[in-house]
Amino acid sequence: MDSEAVLLLETVNFAAEKHRNQRRKDPEGTPYINHPIGVARILSYEGGVTDIEVLQAALLHDTVEDTDTTSEELEAKFGPIVAQIVQEVTDDKRLPKQERKRLQVEHAPCCSRQAKLVKLADKLYNLRDLNAHVPVGWSAERVQEYFVWAAEVVKGLKGTNLALEEKLEKLFKQRGLQL
Ligand SMILES: Nc1nc2c(ncn2[C@@H]2O[C@H](COP(=O)(O)OP(=O)(O)O)[C@@H](OP(=O)(O)OP(=O)(O)O)[C@H]2O)c(=O)[nH]1
Ligand SMILES: [Mn+2]
């Protein structure tokens, strides 16, 4: 087998073990790992991305933020570039939520191109998920606020991947928002 395929299976297995006890916020409690796998798949299948480190970072993108995984652990197992991309898309959970959200808008334009790709696909997945079902406990207003905020983040990611940006733009338009 191709060495990149081996690497991707190693990566998806690592992410699955780390997220094994987590569920999405949808009423069915979908396994959390569906999200990182879907983000990597958006990059590959819809974005035409072939950069293996970006696809690995997509699979791992929520491990440091949402599990006991450390950046050092990722670096030792997957190398400094993958660890760096994941670090760039990791929110500091010690900060209040509003501050975290503000920092995403502020930092988006300064991210590396590789991190911008992961962020575009992450937002596309989450916005589609919101259109498919409202997370448990969320009001319609909270859903709309997420779209408004995501549009601000995506503005700072423009000029990275046209296919993904066009798909995001359509979703924002449906909500009366422009990029
Ligand atoms: N739309 C949706 N999102 C869900 C669901 N289950 C879990 N999530 C996660 O919830 C996060 C968005 O919810 P918020 O309330 O805004 O953020 P928080 O969980 O970090 O506090 C996303 O985190 P993230 O991927 O780290 O992205 P980001 O929003 O922080 O950029 C998303 O992946 C679901 O069923 N639908
Ligand atoms: Mn995510």
Image: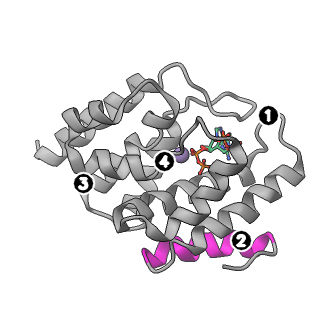
Question: Amino acid type of disc 1?
Answer: Val
- Magenta residue check for 164: yes
Q: Label 1, label 4: how many angstroms apart (C-alpha)? A: 20 Å
How far apart marks 3 and 1 lie (CA) works out to: 34 Å
> Magenta stretch?
160-175
Q: Main secondary structure of the magenta part?
A: helix
Mark 3 and mark 2 residues within 8 Å of each other at the beta carbon: no
Secondary structure state at the residue bearing disc 2 = helix
Tag on residue 136?
1
Nearer to us: label 3 or label 4: 3
Which residue corresponds to mark 3? 52
Question: Measured along the vertical axis of the image, is residue 142 above or below residue 20?
Answer: below
Residue named by callout 4: 38
**Circle nearer the N terminus (3, 1):** 3
- Given the image, on which type of amino acid does mark 2 rest? Phe
Magenta stretch encompasses residue 158:
no
The response on whether ligand 2 sits within 8 Å of label 4 is no
**Three-letter amino acid code of the residue under disc 4:** Gly
Q: Earlier in the sequence, mark 2 or mark 1?
A: 1
Of label 3 and label 4, which has the lower sequence position? Answer: 4
Residue 172, label in figure: 2
Q: Nearer the viewer, residue 59 or 128?
A: 59
Q: CA distance from mark 3 to mark 4?
A: 15 Å
Residue lying at 39% horizontally and 22% vertically, measured from the top left: 17
